[in-house]
Amino acid sequence: MYSLLFLSPLGTLNLLLSLGGLALLGVTVVLAVDYLRYESRLYARFIKPYVEAIIIGTTVGSVVMTLVYSEYFGFIPCSLCWLQRVALYPQALMSIIAVKTKDTLYYPLYGIGLSIFGFIVAVYHYIYQMVPADVLASGGLPCLADGSADCASKVMNTFGFVTFPLLSAITFLFLIVLYLNIRRSNTK
């Protein structure tokens, strides 16, 4: 088992982010089932009063983490990482503006669109990273590599399957479920 005492600061951060991402996946599944099966009862009771703060915290926190890894730890983002950032970064600013202007009508639609795009790219990136190197070398799965970084390299590989694209996909899926709940609560 992992011991936080023997991990480097980067290893500790990777472990904490991985555990947090897996917990967020559990919350996302519960909220998705609640949305689809129980008409958002759990959401209305426990999440709705804090949904703006949760979205702001999720998006701003994700932006900060991507910048910490690239600017502080020096990991160069690949082309697929940049596409995921393109889907994430506007949501941080958009969520703050939406709270200030009390926009709950259009902001969730834009968030859903950006999050679906980011989710698709993240899932593709995750699959790309998990495919064996010899299959990638055959050209069976194209990468948008522009020479800056290899899309197949794993900055994080906790528990043998938790990588940044997986955490990104989980984050986008979580945001989609929250935005759908906001849209549902606007129609009631």
Image (cartoon, helix red, strand yellow):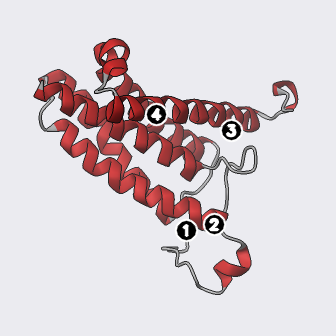
What is the quadrant of the C terminus in the image? top left
State which tag comes first along the sequence, 2 or 4: 4
- Up the image or down, 167 lies above or below 57; here it is below
Query: To which residue does mark 3 refer?
Result: 14
User: Element type at marker 4?
Assistant: helix
- Name the residue tied to disc 2: 152
Q: Are marks 4 and 3 in contact (CB under 8 Å)?
A: no
For discs 1 and 2, the disc positioned in front in the rendered view: 2
Q: Mark 1 points at which residue?
A: 148
Q: Mark 1 falls on what kind of element?
A: loop
Q: Which amino acid does label 4 sit on?
A: Thr
Q: Earlier in the sequence, mark 3 or mark 2?
A: 3
Nearest the viewer among 21 and 181 is 181
Q: Which residue corresponds to mark 4?
A: 28
Q: In this view, does 83 lie to the left or right of 125?
A: left
Which mark is nearer the camera, 1 or 4? Answer: 4
Q: In this image, 72 relative to 84: left or right?
A: right
